[in-house]
Amino acid sequence: ETGVTQSPTHLIKTRGQQVTLRCSSQSGHNTVSWYQQALGQGPQFIFQYYREEENGRGNFPPRFSGLQFPNYSSELNVNALELDDSALYLCASSGTGLYGYTFGSGTRLTVV
Amino acid sequence: GESVGLHLPTLSVQEGDNSIINCAYSNSASDYFIWYKQESGKGPQFIIDIRSNMDKRQGQRVTVLLNKTVKHLSLQIAATQPGDSAVYFCAAANAGNMLTFGGGTRLMVKP
């Protein structure tokens, strides 16, 4: 059984640019969610996808968007990057009827 | 909305002692709670969970206690080991299984 894998592991972008982060769900999981974790803080919920549709969103602006593909993998896109977007971005997956999530190791995004 | 907080940012314990990490939550409608362990450079790792219809659940060396009256939960780690050193987060899940995390407690184990 494979876990949740994320790519890339590290990324440096310039303010104003756009970024795409990728996530492969754990085998058998059909729900994926994304979290932003600033340094020294707990993860904050960005949004959740189920059956390729967004079914929940946290307090993040529209420039944070996502996709879920038929194989349940997912992307997080962030447009017009700001310095405060620098954080660890975590992807997590879960299966039908299961509570809680399995997390990936994250993508460390630095905006300069 | 839900907010989740932890009582101490850092906890230092002697190897072999028991550790207790506390957490408070605000939304009485939260029905599922999870404790995660996060080591440096890694994502949160599931430790133990508990549903709101329970007040105690035990795992291997870990116990979670839930007090719904005061909206408080705790994580107890027995015979703490150096490998337990990490940041511990509690999280509360809403009906849509979306998690609200607390700020984390860093557990430091002294040899």
Image (cartoon, coloured by chain):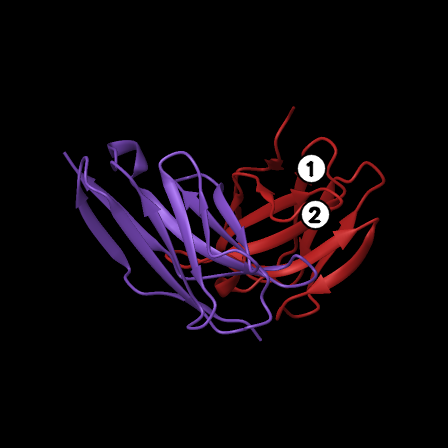
Chain colours: A red, B purple
Q: Is residue A14 above or below residue B79?
A: below
Mark number, residue A25: 1
Pointers 2 and 1 in contact (C-beta within 8 Å): yes
Quarter location, residue A102: top right
Quarter location, residue A61: bottom right
Circle 1 SS class: loop
Residue A74 in the image, given as x and y percentages of width and height:
73, 44
Residue B92 in the image, given as x and y percentages of width and height:
54, 60
Taking the spot 19% from the left edge, 49% from the top edge, the residue there is B12
Q: Earlier in the sequence, mark 2 or mark 1?
A: 1
Taking the spot 45% from the left edge, 70% from the top edge, the residue there is B71
Given residues A17 and A69, the one toward you in this image is A69
Alpha-carbon neighbours of circle 2 within 10 Å: few (<14), some, or many (≥20)?
Answer: many
Q: Is residue A48 visible?
A: yes
Circle 2 SS class: strand
Going by the image, does B101 lie left or right of A18?
left
Given residues A111 and B69, the one toward you in this image is B69
Figure disc tally: 2
Taking the spot 69% from the left edge, 37% from the top edge, the residue there is A25
Mark number, residue B58: none
User: Mark 2 — residue?
Assistant: A32
Mark 2: amino acid = Val
Taking the spot 41% from the left edge, 43% from the top edge, the residue there is B38
